[in-house]
Image (cartoon, rainbow, N blue to C red):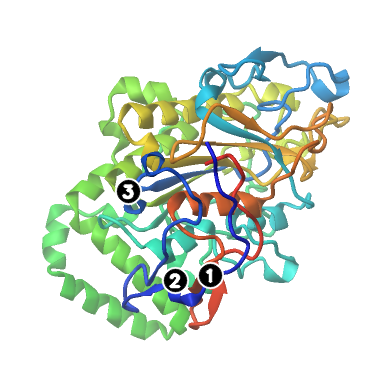
Amino acid sequence: MHISQQSSMPYDRRDLLRVGAMSVGATALAACGETLPAAARAPVDSRSVIFLWMGGGVTHIDSFDPKPTAPAEIRGTLEDIATSLPGVRFSETVPHLAEMADQLAILRSYSHDSNDHLLSQVFTLSGRKVDRAHLFTEPNIGSVVARTLGSRRGLPAYIAVPGITRPGPPPHNFFLGGWLGSQYAPYCLCGTPEQPDFTVGEKKEHPSALVEEDWRPGSLNVTSGQLRRLGSRSRLREQLDLALRSLEQSDETMRSAETKFRDALRLLQNPAIRSAFAITEEPASIREEYGRTKIGGRCLLARRLVEAGARFVMVDYGYDPDYGNVWDNHNAASQKHPPIQEMVKRGYHLAGMDQAFAALIRDLARRGRLAQTLVVFLTEFGRTPRINARGGRDHWGAAGSLFFAGGGVKGGQVIGATDAHAAEPVSTGYSPADVAATIYSAIGIRPYAMVNDFQGRPRPVLEHGRSIPGLL
């Protein structure tokens, strides 16, 4: 298949379609700049994204890029296994994804120049490279999608499941609308965690992976009697207006509160949307297929949400009150982790991720949703090729592995390669900006189109990056 190269020039502002300022999607963009056969792409309005955000730095050498001939201090003790792609091997930690490798586009040359969690997470979540002074200025990819394409079927355009990741210390919230305005931050299902940076509190040496989370948003926890007492939408709005006036908040905060109010009201009023959060309605066989783990439940909820009409759903998993920083496996004493090559076999680590991600892709395909849903596994960087003296791996921005599936992706391929120690790419490296450009292209947004910020000033969706050649 021939795929044209993405233009590097910004598009004129006449490409933008201006609509009402009170609309959730105040600006719509023209179709994607990639040239693809019509049959390979779903109509723009039917597309969704499931953004599998594993914040903390997932080890690439112990998952999608094993090096069986490397020295023991590099490869460790894990075995490599065959995949459904001839000649391509994964680590033994991801057998379910190995079986469906022919449906994935695996990116082995994910690479950038930072080993810092904060800088790298902002870069990955936004596609925009920042310094320390601009950690909170850039909008998430999901925020740009919400701003340009808007909500669908009454669901918030950008939903985070659960949206509790707070890297630190001190804890930082990087789930932001940035210069688009706080009303484009994600609708987070679980609010602020009890241990926001997950560095305090007692951790178990070997916590159970089996956890049933309640995904019914707090805004839906009202009885039919309470709904009757609340009365009409106008009465609810009057109550909110009174509360906002009494708080004397800034205009920006008020816009954010108003957006959250509208989202909650739509959820309350639509029984079909309310039922989307009830994963307990799923057959037991489906629950078991995903795994009765946190990551399994969150992936299952993501499938239900895109089926209900959600446009962009982030599955947020990596900083957890029960497990600490799941992927940040230095094996420091305070983490209470075993050596990384034992850690990866736990049900809340790679073993659980492998089961949940594979189930999500199979389930979307069975239900006829995979072609319309781009599934992207993302983490901010890989881990050091050399195992450290404590049995852990440290931060490593130079190399990592991601994958894409569904949503117009050309599956059954490996893009890029690393050297014999998985230390750096030996082919073209692709940064978070390139990944963001690929996501935008897949969902019908030109990466270099202009969008107005909250002050009405035009800005490019991305400043750098190109759609990864051959992936779509």
Q: Secondary structure at mark 2?
A: helix
| In the rendered image, the vertical position of residue 216 relative to residue 63, given as above or below | below
Q: In the rendered structure, which amino acid carries the disc numbered 3?
A: Ser
> x, y (%) of residue 385?
82, 32
Would residue 72 be found to the left or right of residue 461 on screen?
Answer: right
The count of marks equals 3
| In the rendered image, the vertical position of residue 172 relative to residue 387, given as above or below | below
> x, y (%) of residue 423?
82, 35
The residue carrying mark 1 is 11
Q: In the rendered structure, which amino acid carries the disc numbered 1?
A: Tyr
Q: Is residue 160 visible?
A: no
Q: CA distance from mark 2 to mark 3?
A: 21 Å
Q: Secondary structure at mark 3?
A: helix
Q: Which label sits in the foreground, 3 or 1?
A: 1
Would residue 246 be found to the left or right of residue 182 on screen?
Answer: left
Would residue 335 be found to the left or right of residue 10 on screen?
Answer: right
> x, y (%) of residue 352?
54, 27
The residue carrying mark 2 is 15
Q: In the rendered structure, which amino acid carries the disc numbered 2?
A: Asp
Do the residues bearing badges 1 and 2 touch, measured as CB atoms within 8 Å?
A: yes
The residue carrying mark 3 is 46
